[in-house]
Image: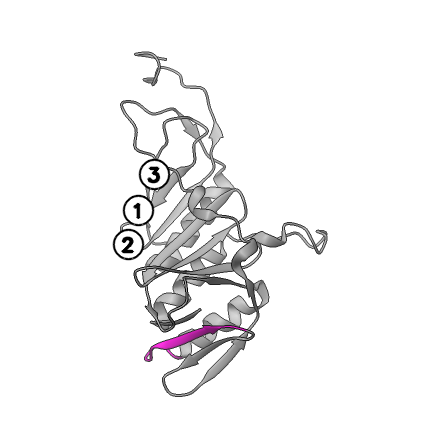
């Protein structure tokens, strides 16, 4: 993968999606859920790049335009957790340039002025097929009552705060698009960060006095 992209946007996307990525406890085994560690960079056809993080409970995806510099089929890489902070710090110091991301035997970020940073990355083949997790929430009348883990939602809010560039303590408006069933994931969007979505796995709660898909009233 070889792309050219605006560093400020890429840095913000990586930091926001990293909040959703798997952060194992210190007691975890070295092989505990290795596919979910780190942040995915996935090149797409049509000159787009997806930045993705997930811990299996919720997922954040930021899609942005990027210039593809090679003719190979779209590919990707996963930024290793230890490289996320130094890579974002490097991108922030080169916000006036376009940067090039090269992923081959060595992953490297390079600015137009010649500055370069090598970072640890692995192949994206073992990363979960994240597009299959994002639900199609178009449905008819009514929607179930859905309950969410408050601690999980606080992570989602923090990710969108970073994505929108809002200061701590400032309101960040969020929109929830629910599925047809109570156990369907919900899509969360924010008008201040239109390029990013979050997919949140809910706790189920039986509907009380709410319209149902199978009966006029549950």
Residue 63 x, y percent position in the rendering: 35, 57
Examine the rendered structure and indicate whether residue 218 appears above or below residue 79. Answer: above
Q: Nearer the viewer, residue 140 or 103?
A: 103
Query: Residue 173: which disc?
Result: 1
For mark 3, give the secondary structure.
strand
Image: magenta residue range: 94-104
Q: In this rendering, which labeled residue sits more in front, label 1 or label 3?
A: 3
For mark 1, give the secondary structure.
loop
Instruction: Say which label, 2 or 1, has the lower sequence index.
Output: 1
Furthest-front residue in this view: 72
Quarter occupied by the C terminus: top left
Magenta segment: does it hold 211? no
Residue 107 x, y percent position in the rendering: 52, 73
Residue contact between numbered discs 2 and 1, judged by CB atoms under 8 Å: yes
Identified at 28% across, 54% down, the residue is 192
Q: Nearer the viewer, residue 4 or 23?
A: 4
How far apart, in angstroms, are the residues tagged by discs 3 and 2? 14 Å
**Picture quarter containing residue 140?**
top left
How far apart, in angstroms, are the residues tagged by discs 2 and 1? 8 Å
Query: Residue 192: which disc?
Result: 2
Residue contact between numbered discs 3 and 2, judged by CB atoms under 8 Å: no
The residue under label 3 is 176
Identified at 32% across, 44% down, the residue is 174
Query: Residue 15: which disc?
Result: none
Identified at 43% across, 36% down, the residue is 185
Q: Nearer the viewer, residue 114 or 132?
A: 132
How far apart, in angstroms, are the residues tagged by discs 1 and 3? 10 Å
């Amino acid at each position: 993968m070889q792309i050219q992209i605006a560093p400020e946007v890429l840095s913000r996307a990586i930091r926001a999606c990293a909040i959703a990525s798997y952060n194992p406890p210190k007691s975890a085994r070295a092989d505990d859920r290795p596919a979910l560690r780190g942040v995915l960079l996935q090149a797409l056809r049509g000159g787009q790049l997806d930045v993705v993080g997930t811990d299996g409970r919720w997922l954040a995806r930021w899609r942005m335009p990027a210039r593809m510099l090679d003719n190979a089929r779209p590919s990707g890489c996963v930024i290793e957790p230890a490289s996320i902070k130094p890579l974002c710090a490097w991108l922030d110091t080169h916000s006036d340039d376009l940067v090039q991301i090269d992923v081959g035997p060595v992953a490297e970020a390079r600015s137009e002025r010649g500055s370069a940073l090598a970072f640890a990355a692995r192949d994206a083949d073992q990363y979960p097929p994240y597009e299959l997790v994002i639900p199609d929430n178009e449905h008819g009348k009514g929607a179930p009552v859905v309950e969410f883990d408050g601690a999980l939602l606080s992570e989602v809010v923090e990710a969108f705060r970073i994505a929108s560039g809002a200061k701590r303590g400032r309101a960040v408006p969020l929109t929830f698009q629910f599925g047809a069933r109570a156990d369907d994931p919900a899509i969360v969007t924010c008008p201040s960060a239109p390029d990013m979505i979050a997919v949140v796995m809910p706790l189920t709660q039986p509907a009380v006095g709410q319209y149902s898909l199978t009966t006029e009233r549950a």
